[in-house]
Image (cartoon, rainbow, N blue to C red):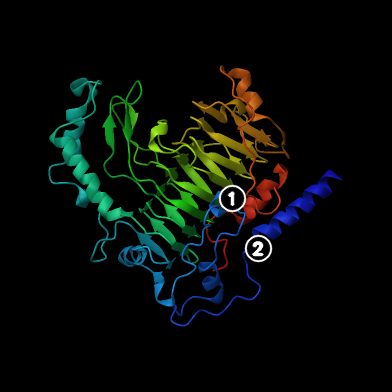
Amino acid sequence: MQNRKLIAALAAALVTAGAGIPGSPAEAGAGEPSQLSPLATWYGRQALPAGDGWGSAGAGTTGGAAASPDQVYVVTSRAELTDALRGDAPKIVFVQGTIDGFEGPAGALLGCDDLADPAYDFDDYLATFDPEVWGRETEPAGPLEDARVRSMRNQEAQTVLKPGSNTTLIGLRGATLLHTTLLFNEADNVIIRNLTIRDAFDCFPQWDPTDGDLGNWNSNWDYVSVRRGTNFWIDHNTFVTPNVEPPSFFGRKFETYDGLLDITHTADLVTISHNVFRDHDKAVLIGSTDNPGGGDPGRLNVTLRHNLFDGLGQRAPRVRFGQVDVYNNYYRIPVAAPFEYGYSWGVGVESAIYAENNYFSLSADDDPATVIADWGGTAITERGTWARTGGSGFGRPVSLLDAYNAVSDPALGDDAGWTPQLRRGPVLPAPGVPVLVGLFAGADRLPI
């Protein structure tokens, strides 16, 4: 009987997950790019369905669905992409092929050396700010640090794209954004779908000797950053980082990567669905500061459903302030070098995580008590979690919160203070989550 219930629930979830495929898509509208198939045209104008997570609240998320035919683009270069994303008029931007953020005005690829300020020299930077010389009490300052900041701003102008509101950014099969940051600042009503987003690194990290007991290298530039914006749908994308061991300086890893997807600075109403987050340290940050004076309380409301979190070090997600619905996600915890596992669910200041029917695949060395980390929060609601240990077997029900509380003082409460209402379709029993997520999560799963 239990197996029949699981099969029935899985079938219903599969129908819901595939419900975006239209029965008879319309032909491309007059004036729209002729290379677009009817399916691509339909998906480009698809809005987030009503009731599908926090992104459907408020005004809802329609992206560029109302774009006129002359505001529908197929782009193949950085210059075309930058131009197409400008402004707040409704627009649909299809990405074709690979677009490299280091592509210069003439089409040739630039490197970090091309973006460095003339006064910046990394060897001099190391020699000047070596803790044995500079000390550990103050952050770097002076002409070399100023030159590093100018270099960082040069990279920002090259690799950081700043799209406007009312945008649908969607990839055709195989579409990849390489070495590119999508920074949405004060932009509303945005859809990002069917893209592989790779290797958005910082050429010019800052050494901060005051960060922790031993200091740290800190980088800018997330893969996608949502700041001060409302109503986002981030769906069927693959975020991935090259598995390369970084060098170390001053005994600390030279960290050139920041977050995969950060939602901060009063952003609100976001649905994150059917994505793959793979091989990275800091994955998803929701809320950037513990200070409530920044306007975050009452905002930062996010839904994460049917995503694969694979080989990540931390932040899947880490939450401050927001009501965050985390359901039917698949976590593969074994982490390959150079990444190291820290935790998955970060319970931060005034956070309200509601985690339901998630599935974890743990190695024999992974302690379930480490999945949750307390970053100043007080409670998390957890229901229906299953875990498999050692990479084989069906798994079993487990309370990660009980495992955490058994070894932690103070303990976390088990009631985050709210119950999600915005869920479209059935919540799948956790044992079926690996199947559903395996079939539908990531880029190139939409038939366009």
**Residue under the point 69% across and 54% down:** 425
Q: Which residue is mark 2?
A: 19
**Residue under the point 65% across and 58% down:** 17
Q: Residue 50: x percent and y percent? A: 61, 58
Going from N to C along the chain, the mark reached first, 2 or 1, is 2
Foreground: 371 or 305? 305
**Residue under the point 28% across and 25% down:** 209
Residue lying at the far right in this picture: please name it: 1
Foreground: 12 or 421? 421
Foreground: 80 or 130? 80
The answer to whether any part of residue 95 appears in the image is no
As measured in the structure, the alpha-carbon distance from the residue carrying label 2 to the one carrying label 1 is 16 Å
Q: Amino acid at mark 1?
A: Gly
Label 2 SS: loop
Left or right, 88 with respect to 135, comes to right
In this picture, is 250 found above or below 236?
A: above
In this picture, is 332 found above or below 14?
A: above
Q: Quadrant of residue 411?
A: top right
Q: Residue 365: x percent and y percent? A: 59, 28
In this picture, is 127 found above or below 264?
A: above
Q: Which residue is mark 1?
A: 53
Q: Residue 236: x percent and y percent? A: 54, 56
Label 1 SS: loop
